[in-house]
Image (tube, rainbow, N blue to C red):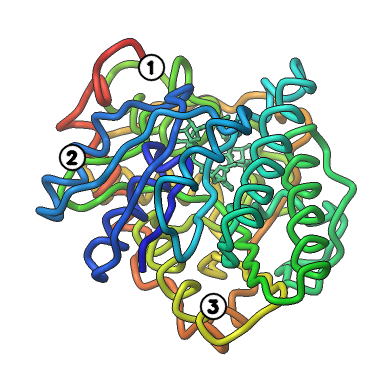
């Protein structure tokens, strides 16, 4: 298939490009590089030995999006593009609503105009209500998001569902990611966060590299076995493969389907620190700090629907996640370089 990948220079998008190319698909990427570097695609080309067309394009500009569709023939869209920093979304809500919603709307409009009927959207476990019993499945309650970023994911899901319903012949897949971590085993592509990382794994790996002097563990008084927060960390290569599985599934169906992409295996902050130390042999100094506002004790997936309908499940272990993160971090101490 000829696949249009929005946000394809970013962390998850670039790993998915590798899996798409290795599965024999062709890839055209559009990104405005607000949170990424086009160097990632040169690395994707090195890994796969295949070319990727890159178009620098801001999806908020509807004429630019239309021009991309007018000059290509796409079979399917993978929509990764979006802003994703929770804290920034609290400080700049309009930026988040404007960017994430308008991008999705412009994309849908261009798809309709040019007869493209299949789209896979990067949603998030953050759309689940914090008061659900764990693990969450695709029927669990959504909404009650605790920040504007989460609401943009919730609203984009609604936009895409309504569009699929109205058109009848569209196929929309909403993939709810849990906590993507890790990097391609080649060490050529990985996560390259700007400034001080918000997420646990990049913070751990930058601490291991000596860029941060210690990790703050946000709370050890949660109602969990060791008191630290529990999440469902999934290797980004497994996550990327989930998109290829979803594309295969889409061949057969119309309407909207939702899938969790997680491992189903709960892991605490302390367990992650220990796993990283074991996999890499590097000690992670840490301090217990106050709870982070908005955090919940535990979030993890029931991924059984993905196995049943997509034939997909995560294959890579916590050790793989830690080893591959460290391989990327140590081979690329400044990420892709440049001004990020
Ligand atoms: P990322 O920031 O690395 O990638 C997103 C890409 O979108 C970036 O390359 C950025 O430059 C691009 N982009 C943003 N706004 C754009 C616009 N208006 N026009 C064109 N390009 C634009 O993030 P990621 O971790 O790869 O996440 C990919 C998707 O998955 C995002 O939609 C994110 O919300 C979602 N998601 C991520 C996580 C996670 O923990 N990484 C979890 C759940 C969902
Ligand atoms: N966390 C932490 N220190 C950090 C970053 C995160 O203790 O520097 C904890 C956080 O409180 C949560 C877990 O690690 O329990 C995962 O946080 P992350 O931000 O990576 O993912 P999210 O909370 O969005 O699921």
Task: Give the crowd class for mark 3: few <14, some 14-19, many >=20 residues within 10 Å.
Answer: many
Looking at this view, name the residue that lies furthest to the top. 339
Considering only vertical position in the picture, is 34 above or below 24?
Answer: above
Front position among marks 2 and 3: 3
Q: CA distance from mark 3 to mark 1?
A: 43 Å
Circle 2 SS class: helix
Name the mark on residue 143. none
Camera-nearest residue between 9 and 195? 9
Q: Is residue 231 visible?
A: no
Asked if labels 1 and 3 touch by Cβ distance under 8 angstroms, the answer is no
Residue where numbered disc 1 is placed: 212
- The quarter of the image that holds ligand 2 is top right
Q: CA distance from mark 2 to mark 1?
A: 27 Å
The image position of residue 264, as x and y in percent, is 57, 70
Asked if labels 1 and 2 touch by Cβ distance under 8 angstroms, the answer is no
Circle 3 SS class: helix
Q: CA distance from mark 2 to mark 3?
A: 28 Å
Q: Quadrant of residue 82?
A: top right
Circle 1 SS class: loop
Q: Earlier in the sequence, mark 3 or mark 1?
A: 1
Name the mark on residue 250. 3
The image position of residue 120, as x and y in percent, is 56, 61
Residue where numbered disc 2 is placed: 43
Q: Quadrant of residue 163?
A: bottom right
Q: Earlier in the sequence, mark 2 or mark 1?
A: 2
The quadrant of the rendering that contains the N terminus is: bottom left
The image position of residue 307, as x and y in percent, is 52, 84
Task: Give the crowd class for mark 1: few <14, some 14-19, many >=20 residues within 10 Å.
Answer: some
């Amino acid at each position: 298939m000829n696949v249009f990948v929005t946000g394809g220079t970013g962390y998850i998008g670039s790993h998915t490009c590798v899996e798409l190319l290795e599965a024999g698909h062709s890839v055209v990427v559009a990104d405005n590089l607000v949170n990424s570097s086009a160097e990632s695609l040169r690395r994707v080309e090195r890994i796969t030995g295949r070319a990727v067309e890159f178009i620098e394009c801001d999806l908020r500009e509807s004429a630019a999006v239309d021009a991309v569709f007018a000059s290509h023939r796409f079979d399917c869209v993978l929509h990764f593009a979006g802003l994703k920093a929770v804290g920034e979304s609290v400080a700049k809500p309009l930026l988040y609503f404007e960017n994430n919603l308008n991008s999705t709307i412009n994309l849908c409009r261009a798809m309709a105009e040019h007869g493209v009927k299949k789209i896979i959207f990067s949603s998030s476990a953050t759309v689940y209500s914090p008061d659900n019993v764990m693990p969450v499945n695709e029927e669990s309650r959504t909404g009650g998001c605790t920040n504007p970023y989460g609401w943009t994911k919730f609203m984009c899901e609604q936009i895409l569902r309504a569009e699929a319903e109205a058109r009848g012949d569209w196929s929309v897949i909403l993939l709810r990611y849990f906590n993507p971590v890790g990097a391609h085993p080649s060490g050529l592509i990985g996560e390259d966060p700007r400034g001080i990382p918000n997420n646990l794994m990049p913070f751990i790996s930058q601490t291991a590299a000596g860029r941060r002097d210690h990790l703050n563990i946000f709370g050890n008084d949660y109602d969990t076995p060791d008191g630290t927060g529990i999440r469902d960390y999934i290797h980004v290569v497994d996550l990327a493969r989930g998109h290829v599985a979803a594309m295969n599934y889409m061949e057969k169906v119309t309407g909207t389907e939702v899938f969790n992409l997680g491992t189903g295996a709960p892991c605490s902050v302390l367990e992650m620190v220990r796993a990283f130390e074991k996999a890499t042999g590097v000690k992670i100094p840490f301090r217990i700090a106050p709870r982070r506002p908005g955090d919940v004790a535990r979030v993890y997936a029931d991924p059984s629907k993905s196995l049943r309908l997509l034939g997909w499940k995560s294959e890579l272990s916590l050790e793989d996640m830690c080893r591959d993160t460290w391989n990327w971090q140590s081979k690329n101490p400044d990420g892709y370089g440049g001004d990020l």
